[in-house]
Amino acid sequence: MKASELETILVSGALEIQIRHRSISKMKDVFRKKLPKSDPSLLFSKITRYVNNGMMDEFWYEGTGKEIKDLFDGFDPEIIASLLSITSIRATVTSNATKFFKALQQFYENKIYTVLVGNRKNRKKMNSAFRGFLDASLYHLNSLKNGKSMIDPAHRLVNGRKIKNFTDAMLSGVEAIVDDVWITRAFGCDRKRVFRSRTTSQSPTKAIYDATEWYLQTVAHLVGKKGRGLCAMIWSGVRQEKSKSSTRYTEALRKRLDHGLFVGHYGKLMISEKGGIEFESL
């Protein structure tokens, strides 16, 4: 986009906001007073650029929700979205897809495993319907298996706020804000820590999440967007500058559903009567 084209968009937006709210300076004062406090504070200098970068991904969440619903039409859409979001912790799109199918198999196996959880120096045994996942994932996977809904408002703020909002955004939560490490980087509040000799990004604190959520939902309303749409644009926009990895689940999931040379022998994926999942025999 040329500088003059971007300038036109900015001027048009400023005039529209001024028409609606009479005074941009007063609106700034409202933002300064109502924006939740966080440490570090949110920075906004690059947000417009990220929105511009990712404008084509405004409908990423609802689009992804529809795609996975179509790919897994024999399954409960909420279960599919929940498993995909739970297995997204510390995962790329490709590894997320691999973990998702593993979790889907175990969800319908109805087996109980003994797994070790907790810090490396003080591991404890736990009965679990799943194995081979991060402790945080195991907690939410077992909760889902026990009938707890990821999008139930009564459980949304207990823990796992990001993955619960991720599930909600892929379903019907138009104001769900998915605040992951990419969003914190976009707002300049990415917190680092050393983990096993590597520097990694931490999940946002409650204060940072509260501030980001309020800002995105408020700005989205001002500019006629949905919260999840504005969040998706920024998420996509910052990733384009920092990473070349794919942001689309469909291709990674479809590859594992493709029968290749055996397309004439098998049909769609389904719940197996023996437990787990299997492909329909044709």
Image (spheres, rainbow, N blue to C red):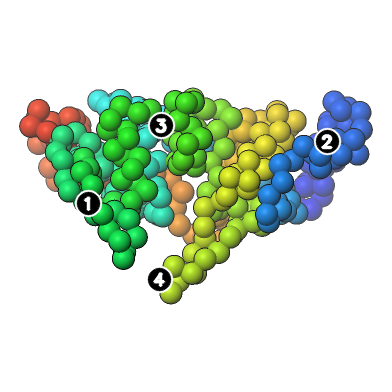
Q: Amino acid at mark 4?
A: Arg
In the image, which disc is placed on residue 150?
Answer: 3
Which is in the foreground here, disc 3 or disc 1?
A: 1
How many residues crowd around disc 1 within 10 Å: few (fewer than 14), some, or many (20 or more)?
Answer: few
Please give the residue where the numbered disc 2 appears in the rendered image.
30
How many residues crowd around disc 3 within 10 Å: few (fewer than 14), some, or many (20 or more)?
Answer: many
Marks 2 and 3 in Cβ contact (< 8 Å): no
- How far across and how far down the image is residue 210, in percent? 63, 41
In the image, which disc is placed on residue 125?
Answer: 1
Note whether 115 is above or below 278 in the view shown: below
Note whether 24 is above or below 235 in the view shown: above
* Residue 40 shows up from this direction: yes
* Residue 72 shows up from this direction: no
How far apart in space, not on screen, are marks 2 and 3 (Cα)? 33 Å
Please give the residue where the numbered disc 4 appears in the rendered image.
196
- How far across and how far down the image is residue 194, in percent? 49, 69
Please tell me which residue is depicted at 77% across the width and 47% down the height of the picture: 6
Marks 4 and 3 in Cβ contact (< 8 Å): no
Instruction: Give SS at disc 3.
Output: loop
Q: Amino acid at mark 3?
A: Met
Instruction: Give SS at disc 1.
Output: strand
Position of residue 137 in the picture relative to residue 39 (left or right): left
**Mark 1 or mark 2, which is nearer the start of the sequence?**
2
Please tell me which residue is depicted at 66% across the width and 33% down the height of the picture: 217
Note whether 48 is above or below 269 in the view shown: below
